[in-house]
Amino acid sequence: MKKKSNINDIKKIINSEFKTKRVTANKLDKVLYKPFKVLDHGFVRVIDYMGDDSSIVQAARVSYGKGTKKLNQDKNLINYLLSHRHTTPFEMNEIKFHIKLPIFVARQWIRHRTANVNEYSARYSILDNEFYIPKIDDVKPQSQQNNQGRAGEIDKDLGRHYLSLMKENGKINFSSYKHLLNVDEDGEVLDEKRTGIARELARMVLPLSSYTQWYWKIDLHNLMHFLALRFDDHAQYEIRVYAEVMLDLMKKWVPLTYDAFVRNRVNSLTLSSEAIEFLKMKIKNKKNNYNNISKRELENLKKIFDF
Ligand SMILES: Cc1cc2nc3c(=O)[nH]c(=O)nc-3n(C[C@H](O)[C@H](O)[C@H](O)COP(=O)(O)OP(=O)(O)OC[C@H]3O[C@@H](n4cnc5c(N)ncnc54)[C@H](O)[C@@H]3O)c2cc1C
């Protein structure tokens, strides 16, 4: 019941028109409240935001004491700020998301301490019978190179067997959850003669693949920090897909900042002093001392520079 009234509230807001003197981002306004599907049951939607590219420029110009300039100059200024890590103007913009995500993804996500979070309470409400089950192509063996990841391929029949175990596990756990609560999915009592236990206790039997939801509000500077870490190849696939959707939403919100972010962070590279020496020698066609550079960094350079 509670969730339906939540959706109705959102529908009501979508159909309302608000007049404002604040700056707005048209492209983001068009998708405000729209859920973008992620994984099998998750989503990301933007609930609210403050500021656009011009707000960053406006804040920055306070420090430089200049008035508003043309688009091209704004673009250059934003690029300059981002590439020189003059970050505070980006903190002037805020964005609020509604996100539905598996609990194991939420555990990684919550490590980003600079956001404001309000999470769905499984003490207050009964969780849905929904568990994240990966697609067969995303089921891979443990990587031998990267202790924190998956790599290579698994026999498809074996993969399907593992997936069926995951599904079975979800079913069994949810059935225990209902038994402990002594209610069904609609909140109806299962057995009048038995007393169930509290929701805050019964939830302990649910797996990490269960979905949770939260409102997550963050400023643009810290959003970019989050995206730089979680859009990266080293992040787990299941959080990266959320970052992909959010990066796309950022593009609709602050296109000039998005452009500078992709150029200066997403598609850029930080090099160790050993790697710089190594590349200098490579450019001069001199014999390289591979020993000074770490294996991981060397592999990364080989991949990027294609040698
Ligand atoms: C690929 C990957 C693998 C990871 N593996 C692990 C792992 O195995 N185990 C594990 O525990 N974590 C792991 N993490 C989490 C990681 O260590 C960070 O906790 C997470 O990425 C959040 O980063 P952050 O602290 O920079 O972000 P935020 O919490 O958003 O903080 C942003 C910035 O604010 C500053 N800040 C915030 N709070 C403080 C504070 N209290 N003191 C000082 N400065 C602060 C810091 O400069 C920080 O960089 C992993 C993350 C990634 C991306």
Image (tube, rainbow, N blue to C red):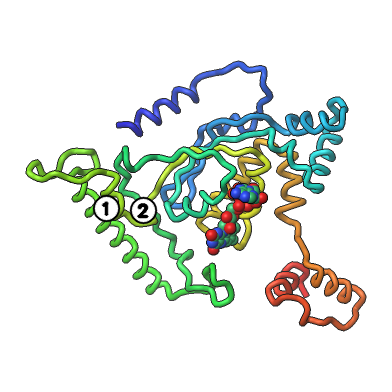
Left or right side of 114 for 105 = left
Query: Disc 1 or 2, which lies upstream in sequence?
Result: 2
Query: Residue 194 lies in what quarter of the image?
Result: top left
The image shows residue 124, relative to residue 208, as above or below, that is: above
Residue highlighted by disc 2: 131
Q: In the image, residue 193 lies at what x, y percent?
A: 7, 43
Of residue 210 and residue 70, the one placed in the foreground of this image is 210
Residue pushed farthest right?
284
Locate residue 94, reporting x and y percent. 63, 34
C-beta proximity under 8 Å, tags 1 and 2:
yes
Q: Is residue 236 visible?
A: no
The Cα–Cα distance between marks 1 and 2, rounded to whole angstroms, is: 9 Å
> Is 127 on the left-hand or right-hand side of 42?
left
> Dividing the picture into quarters, in which one does residue 82 lie?
top right
Q: 305 or 126, which is in the foreground?
A: 126
Mark identifier at residue 174: 1
User: Could you say which disc has been placed on residue 11 in the image?
Assistant: none
Task: Indicate the position of residue 260 as horizontal and vertical percent values.
Answer: 76, 45
